[in-house]
Amino acid sequence: MPKILKSSDLAQVLSVSESTLFRMRKDPSFPKPKQIHKRCVGWLDKDIEKWLEQCPAA
């Protein structure tokens, strides 16, 4: 079963601030969040894993 990551959890996984995560969302290659509630979104862990695999190593 896929796990849903809220923005604070995803920022921690990616080792970035939530402000940086907000900027990263503007990149078309970044996975689109899923609507959880009216004012809450989250990302599927499998979407993030796939995106990380496609990112070039820094």
Image: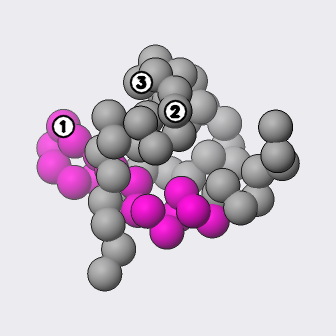
Q: Quadrant of the N terminus?
A: bottom left
Residue pointed to by mark 2:
15
Q: Residue pushed farthest top?
A: 19
Decide if residue 39 is on the left or right side of residue 46. left
Give percent across and percent down for residue 29.
Answer: 69, 48
From the image, which quarter does the C terminus lie in? top right
In magenta stretch: residue 46: yes
Amino acid type shown at disc 3: Glu
Residue 51, how many percent across, how many down?
A: 65, 57
Q: Residue at x 22, y 42 (%)?
A: 40
The residue that label 1 is drawn on is 39
Front-most of 1 and 31?
1
The residue shown at (33%, 42%) is 9
Front position in the image: 13 or 50:
13
Q: Tag 2 or tag 1, which sits nearer the N-term?
A: 2
Mark nearer the viewer, 3 or 1 = 3
In this view, the residue in front, 13 or 29, is 13
**Residue that badge 3 annotates:** 18
The magenta region covers: 35-50
Q: Position of residue 33 (x, y in %)?
A: 42, 50
Identified by mark 2, the residue type is Ser
Measured Cα–Cα span from mark 1 to mark 2: 24 Å
Does label 3 or label 1 sit earlier along the sequence? 3
Residue at the outermost bottom position: 1
Say which mark, if any, is on residue 20: none
Residue type, numbered disc 1: Arg
Badge 2 density bin: few <14, some 14–19, many ≥20, Cα 10 Å: few
